[in-house]
Image (cartoon, rainbow, N blue to C red):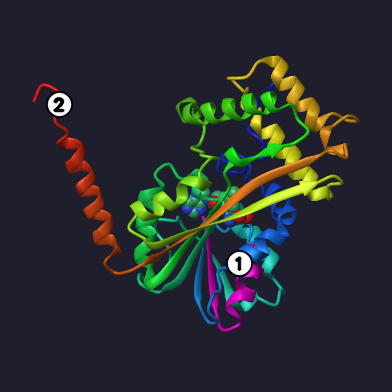
């Protein structure tokens, strides 16, 4: 039987967004996430926007990177996430460095041209028009400021002791469903977004676009939080009725990961692998013109493709 509900949904209807789930996900990749922020080599005293900050899990990592002289504005559309973020920061060493505000990615609550860095983790997968959203974020950066987008790409996910053909069918079915599910009333989602980000940033007018990948591998025995993460993901792959999978595939898949006593997670052959993407681009005041020029060139080119009769 497929899982019919949306898995770990938040109050905005986004799957894999419930606060408890976000905390588990964060803890299960804590080392890699710390490294991602250190690799940004942020300047002390920077003004950073954490765009789609959720419950503020990245705040301490960012605060440490910019030193007490820096400031973080965490924004999100979810009031529940913002209340949690505010509560989590109370009495913490970084509390004077952070403010959480309700806002969308396209309309940040800061003066234009002031941010040194806009960081956004695990949000781009929910953007139906990521190029326009990134182009709208650019003008909030100062000249030379950076937009950094971090996200997943489930096309890179592998479980080494699960039947390879079953895995392929499950991943292919979900990829197909993601193209259709908006028409069935679900919120937009692209869980294959990671490898597309560099192209999106270039199309939005960003320069010096750089992609860095982080391979996340875990072997048996699994830490408890990573086990919960994998079980949540496995359930998510076959949620919303799993329309493109047979009942046998759904049953076998759920057995692999969620059976009470007999899961692949408890075998010493268990290895999982997934690659996450961190993509950065620099904003110059001329970037917006570049974005519009690219759009005009693109629409001009597509309007003037000669037909075979011409
Ligand atoms: C998967 S959570 C990630 C939270 C956090 N960045 C993290 O990595 O733990 C995605 C968050 O983005 C927020 N979000 C989605 N679309 C947004 C938008 N257009 N503007 C602002 N926040 C948005 C959601 O409310 C949610 O809190």
Q: Which residue is mark 2?
A: 307
As for residue 77 lying within the magenta part, the answer is yes
Q: Nearer the viewer, residue 125 or 90?
A: 125
Stretch of the chain drawn in magenta = 58-78
Residue 223: where, in percent of width, then height? 83, 50
Residue 141 percent location from the top left of the image: 39, 69
Q: Quadrant of residue 1?
A: top right
Judged from this view, the residue extending furthest toward the bottom is 69
Q: CA distance from mark 1 to mark 2?
A: 50 Å
Residue 11 in sight in this render: yes
Query: Image height check: is 96 above or below 250?
Result: below
Sequence-first disc among 1 and 2: 1
Observer able to see residue 110: no
What residue appears at the point 71 percent right and 32 percent down from the top-left corner?
235
| Left or right: 301, with 150 as reference point | left
10 Å crowding of disc 2: few (<14), some (14-19), many (20+):
few
Q: Residue at x 35, y 57 (%)?
A: 136
Image coords of residue 75 (percent x, y): 52, 61
- Identify the mark at residue 37; answer none if there is no mark: 1
């Amino acid at each position: 039987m497929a899982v019919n509900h949306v898995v770990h949904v938040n109050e905005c209807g986004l799957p894999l967004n419930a606060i408890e789930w976000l905390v588990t996900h964060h803890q299960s990749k804590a080392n890699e996430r710390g490294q991602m922020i250190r690799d940004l080599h942020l300047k002390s005293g920077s003004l950073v926007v954490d765009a789609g900050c959720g419950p503020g899990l990245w705040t301490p990592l960012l605060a440490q990177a910019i030193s007490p002289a820096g400031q973080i504005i965490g924004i999100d559309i979810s009031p529940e996430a913002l209340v949690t973020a505010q509560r989590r920061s109370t009495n913490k060493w970084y509390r004077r460095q952070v403010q959480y505000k309700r806002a969308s990615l396209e309309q940040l609550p800061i003066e234009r041209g002031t941010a040194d860095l806009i960081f956004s983790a695990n949000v781009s997968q929910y953007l139906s028009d990521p190029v326009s959203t990134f182009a709208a974020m650019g003008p909030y950066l100062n000249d030379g400021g950076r937009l950094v987008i971090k996200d997943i790409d489930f096309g890179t996910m592998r479980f080494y002791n699960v039947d390879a053909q079953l895995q392929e069918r499950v991943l292919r079915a979900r990829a197909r469903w993601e193209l259709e599910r908006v028409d069935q009333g679900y919120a937009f989602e692209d869980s294959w977004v990671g490898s597309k980000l560099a192209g999106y940033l270039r199309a939005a007018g960003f320069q010096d676009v750089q992609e860095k990948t982080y391979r996340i591998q875990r072997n048996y025995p699994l830490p408890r939080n990573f086990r919960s993460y994998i079980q949540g993901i496995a359930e998510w792959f076959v949620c919303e009725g799993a329309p493109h999978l047979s009942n046998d595939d759904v049953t076998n898949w759920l057995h692999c990961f969620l059976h009470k006593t007999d899961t692949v997670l408890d075998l010493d052959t268990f290895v999982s692998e997934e690659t996450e993407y961190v993509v950065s681009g620099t904003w110059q005041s001329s970037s917006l013109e570049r974005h519009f020029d690219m759009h005009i060139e693109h629409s001009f080119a597509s309007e003037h493709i000669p037909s075979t009769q011409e």
